[in-house]
Image: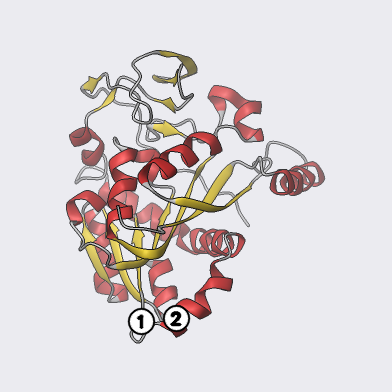
Amino acid sequence: MRDIKTWSTPVIHEQKQRVPCILCGSDSFEPALDCEGFSYVRCRVCSLVQQNPQPRREAIEARYGDHSSQAYLEYELANEGAFLTLQQKGLADGGFFELEPDILRQQAEPPLVLDIGCATGALLEWLRDRGWDCLGVELCGPAADYARKVRNLNIITGTIESAKLSDNSVTVALASHVIEHVNNPKTFVSEIYRCLKVGGYFYITTPNIDGFQARLFGSRWRSAIFDHLYLFSKKTLRALLEDAGFIVEKTVSWGGLARGTAPGPIKNMADRLAKQFNWGDVVLMRCRKVSAQ
């Protein structure tokens, strides 16, 4: 598969605010990564890596507004086939296809799958064809419009918080490469927990800062970009999910070296080892809501 260049807004001046650690509430940080035009700090208490001070929520949402939304749509359309393949592989690694037959069989009506940050809706369209009732949430207006008009999908334009979904209404929630972009990952995860049915599943995917690539490249790591406000490790992501009430059932990771950083045989070996020893560039966790809070 060809390499996919990660979408990132050019570094611009935005009004910023200092915030306590979203995971543990501490206000004690140390330098972590010094990137070109921005930087990350690490919480001295829980080790969560984050931009701090960070742009306000209005500034973050504006990045996907009128000035760049069409360019973002074009980026998603150019890469949606590759993205879909990666998402399908991630779901396979997370055991989705072993669970799916029983979920579909046990419910009288098609169960609802929610894709947060659904972009152009390629994954939802594919899941609909497999028998799921599909709902998407997408902040980029043109991408949401495309999914509605071209794929005839039910899409809410906005964030998971602004969508205000009903309690206990979703059977499976998906969020691939979204949580690192949001100002408040804690409310993001809590809102997903609230709208999931008891027994429902949440699949979350995000860059892994304790993976081999991040350790090797440091501030030059391909996921240390302006749009990523948080960089999670397996430890900090699990802590966030468990604090919201989730049980983490499975953790997988993949990606040893990016293309172009090493000869083919070395990259292939690194990829195999990263997956085998679970220190890949990207981490996926399958979580379950086992009780109402």
Nearer to us in this view, 13 or 183:
183
Query: Mark 2 highlights which residue?
Result: 104
Query: Mark 1 highlights which residue?
Result: 110
Q: Is residue 220 left or right of residue 191?
A: right
Mark 2 residue type: Leu
Residue 81 drawn at (x, y percent): 50, 64
Q: Earlier in the sequence, mark 1 or mark 2?
A: 2
Helix, strand or loop for disc 1: loop
Q: Which residue: 58% across, 24% down?
A: 218
Find the distance from the CA under tag 1 to the CA under tag 2: 7 Å
Q: Is residue 9 left or right of residue 82?
A: left
Evaluate if marks 1 and 2 touch, with contact meaning CB atoms under 8 Å apart: yes
> Which quarter of the picture shows residue 95?
bottom right
How many residues crowd around disc 1 within 10 Å: few (fewer than 14), some, or many (20 or more)? some
Helix, strand or loop for disc 2: helix
Q: Is residue 136 left or right of residue 3?
A: left
Residue 65 drawn at (x, y percent): 21, 45
Q: Which residue: 21% across, 61% down?
A: 165
How many marks the image carries: the answer is 2
